[in-house]
Amino acid sequence: MPQLDKFIFFNQYIWFTLFFFIFYVYILFIILPLIFKILKFRTKKVQSLEKSLDFKLKFYDLLEIKCFSFYDFSVLNYWNNNFNLLEEFYSFYFFNKFKS
């Protein structure tokens, strides 16, 4: 079997070791720092977006509260007052109409 030949086996062992060592150094010094840099950038970007979103949500909540409080105060009061006037008008109108 040529794979286990004593003269060829040493040569294959050397090439395998050399290839493995070069591959290991490439992964260790080029690929892993690149992955680390990308992950670090992503975490900073997510934190920045989280702060921005948190501010926007707080602002939106404040705006929503103010708008609804304005709506509750002005529009509903206006509606209730006019509804009472309409109710009085219709009751008077129908009462007089059916009376005669």
Image (cartoon, helix red, strand yellow):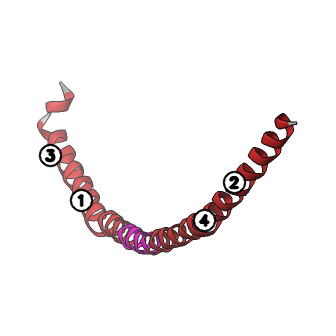
Left or right, residue 31 beside residue 86: left
Magenta residue check for 45: yes
Q: Which mark is residue 24?
A: 1
Q: Amino acid at mark 3?
A: Phe
- Residue 85 against residue 70 in the figure, above or below: above
Disc on the earlier residue, 3 or 1: 3
Q: First in sequence, mark 1 or 4: give its number.
A: 1
Pointer 3 residue? 10
For label 2, the SS is: helix
Q: Is residue 58 magenta?
A: no
Quadrant containing the C terminus is top right
> What is the CA distance from the residue labelled 1 to the residue labelled 4?
67 Å
From the image, which quarter does the N terminus lie in? Answer: top left
**Label 3 with label 2: CB-CB less than 8 Å:** no
Q: Which residues are magenta?
A: 42-54
Question: Left of 25 or right of it: where is 64?
Answer: right
N-term-proximal mark, 3 vs 2:
3
| Residue at the spot 21% in from the left edge and 44% down from the top edge | 12
- What amino acid is at disc 2? Phe
